[in-house]
Image (tube, rainbow, N blue to C red):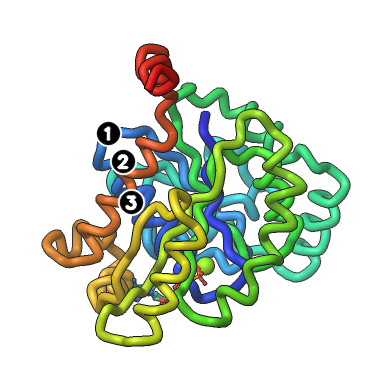
Amino acid sequence: MQVLPVISAKGGVGKTTVAANLSTTLAELGRRVLAIDLDPQSALRLHLAPEPASQRGGLASVMRRERNWRDAMVHGRQGVLLLPFGDLDDDGLISLEQHLAGHPNWLGELLASFSLPDDTLVIVDTPPGPSVYLQQVLRLSRINIVPLLADAGSVAAAPLLEQRVARYCVPRADFIGNAYVLNQTDPGRRLNHDVQKLLRQKLGDEVLGTVHLDPAVSEALASALPVRQYAPWSQSAQDFADCAAHLLRRLAPVSAPASQAMRQR
Ligand SMILES: Nc1ncnc2c1ncn2[C@@H]1O[C@H](COP(=O)(O)OP(=O)(O)O)[C@@H](O)[C@H]1O
Ligand SMILES: [Mg+2]
């Protein structure tokens, strides 16, 4: 099982969009995908399983002891299995967050109890910035997927995440690294172009790819469809395919002959 949190210091940068579209694109490539919504906004289901029933289930329904975990999951677009966040009132949220603060391995134990096949990719949407949800998932991640806008605000907020990644991920031998998705790129805007160039220089190999600013992205959400289904020939559909392929390459273990060949060079 490979846990891939989608994280960012700021809101509105495309976490949920990237989580949903990478999930469906990876499923399209034949991978088994469980998408988990760890954000109380509960927006991942709008992309993956918009039926009202999915909002009544999810993590919240388990916390309210109305369902067991298996029944709390729903079948989403492209065969993605979705655990929505669901609907928790303020008291429910406070007690969930207190529980998470006192049980740092809650998510790890939960995932272990699902007995998922080893090759399952678990994509986890998170709320922006530091939170108990972020702490839980960073303790398990193989690769952090980090959507980033090419603007000064995103660059300034980046250290908030770097501290947490340094604490919860970097010391673990199974952590591969961060994978940045430069989102809403617009080659026609000079500043966007320049900041993007700077980010690429700074982040190097850790850039997974770019997703262009594309009206197909918000239109697809309005139709509750993955971009690749809504507009298969759009720029962003191609971008998500490129990012998913690159992600799979980063996850693939370096085979022994290949690593030997690299050492010999
Ligand atoms: N590449 C893109 N092109 C156009 N609109 C986008 C793109 N990525 C995200 N959006 C829009 O930006 C808004 C915020 O995206 P969202 O995924 O909800 O961000 P977050 O989860 O980080 O708060 C949404 O309205 C979404 O449709
Ligand atoms: Mg979101």
- In the rendered structure, which amino acid carries the disc numbered 2? Ala
Q: Locate residue 125: give its quadrant.
A: bottom right
Q: Residue at x 60, y 73 (%)?
A: 10
Label pair 3/1, CB-CB below 8 angstroms: no
Residue corresponding to mark 2: 27
Label pair 1/2, CB-CB below 8 angstroms: yes
Can you say which quadrant of the picture contains the C terminus? top left
**Residue 255 at x, y percent in the picture:** 39, 17
Label pair 3/2, CB-CB below 8 angstroms: no
The disc at residue 243 is: 3
CA separation in Å, label 3 and label 1: 15 Å
Q: Residues within 10 Å of mark 2 (few under 14, many from 20)?
A: many
Find numbered disc 2 in the image and state the secondary structure of the residue it sits on: helix
The disc at residue 30 is: 1
**Residue 62 at x, y percent in the picture:** 66, 46
Q: As displayed, is residue 68 above or below residue 24?
A: above
- In the rendered structure, which amino acid carries the disc numbered 3? Cys
Q: As displayed, is residue 142 above or below residue 51?
A: above
Q: Nearer the viewer, mark 3 or mark 1?
A: 3
The disc at residue 152 is: none
Find numbered disc 1 in the image and state the secondary structure of the residue it sits on: loop
166 horizontally vs 104: left or right: left
Q: Residue at x 40, y 17 (%)?
A: 264
